[in-house]
Structures are given as C-alpha cells and as structure tokens.
Image: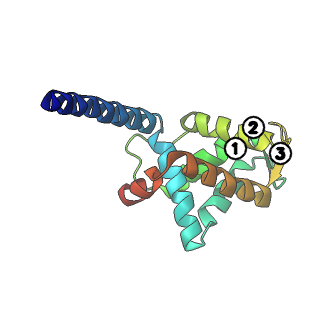
Amino acid sequence: VHQQRMASNRRVLGCVLVLAAMCVAEAASKVDHHTVKMHTAFLKARTDDDFSHWKEAYERADRDRDGKVSVGEVGSIFSEHYNLYHDDKPRGDATEAHFVQDAIDFTAMVAQLGWGKDRAMTEDEFMEQMHAYVDLKKQERGSLYDIAGHIF
C-alpha cells in the first residue's frame, strides 16, 4: 500500500511539474523578442548610465520637433530605438507594429496618472515613465530579462 501511494504521489508530482513548465513556457512565448530586446537594452542603459540611444530615438519620434511626443505615439519611440540600437536585424527594421503590446501596456500604465493618448510627454517625462514601465515588466516577468540579457 505504501509503495502504491508513493508511486501515485510521484505521478501527481510529475504532472504538476509538467503543468508548471507548460505555464512558464506559455508565459514566455507571449513576450515578443522585440520586447525582450527593448527591455534588456533599457536595463543595460541603466546599468551603463548611457541613455543616448533612447534620447536619439525620442528625438526621431518627435516628428514636428516641438520637444514632445504623445503617449499614443510611444510605439514610434520603441521602434526608433530598436532600429538605432540593434545592428543585427535579419528581418529588417522594426516598425511600430512590433511594439503594439508594449505601447498598449505603457499607455495603460500612464493612464493611472491621468494621462490619455493625446497627452504630450517631454523627453524627461518619457524617460521617467520608461523607468517605471521597465521595472513593472521586470517584476511581472521575473528573471526572464536576466536570462535574456545574456542571450541578446
């Protein structure tokens, strides 16, 4: 009886481990490589205290050169940064379409501040919110970015 119970416990434990692995794989598969590269690049910029690529991406996204980019245009900053920062782009340049989920999530986060899509952000405001956004995503995704930082 004891051996049967132990065998049953092992089968249950095995199923739990397989289910847990599937859940982790499902969560990881929902994070696009453009997103991972963007976030790990931001974390590297923070470590190196060098946000020059981000500043240049912001300036490129500021199409009318008024020193502001609207919350609704944040995907443009993300794609500009990707194209500036990453030399290896086997499928070509990134577009805003590659960062739709990031733009949605960033917009939702700043909406808690009362900022709508038309709210114009200065570069300093964008950078402040970008720090908060990457911290939020790092907390949600655990060690994914630590691991990805070694890959990308």
Q: Is residue 24 left or right of residue 6?
A: right
What is the secondary structure assignment of the residue under circle 3? loop
| Closer to the eye: label 3 or 1 | 3
Q: Secondary structure at mark 1?
A: helix
The span from disc 2 to disc 1 (Cα, nearest Å) is 6 Å
Q: Report crowding for label 2: few under 14, some 14 to 19, many 20 or more residues within 10 A (C-alpha).
A: some
Point out the tag, 3 or 2, that comes first from the N-terminus: 2
Q: Nearer the viewer, residue 8 or 57?
A: 8
Front in this rendered view, residue 22 or 118: 22
Asked whether the beta carbons under mark 2 and mark 1 sit within 8 Å of each other, the answer is yes
* CA distance for labels 3 and 1: 16 Å
Residue at point 53% right, 51% down? Answer: 38
The kind of residue on which mark 2 rests is Gly
Q: Nearest to the eye among marks 3 and 2: give it.
A: 3
| Residue 125 in sight | yes
Q: Which residue is mark 1?
A: 74
In this rendering, is residue 89 above or below 95? below
> Which disc, if any, is residue 72?
2
Q: Amino acid at mark 1?
A: Val
Question: On residue 113, which mark appears?
Answer: 3
Determine the image quadrant of residue 70.
Answer: top right
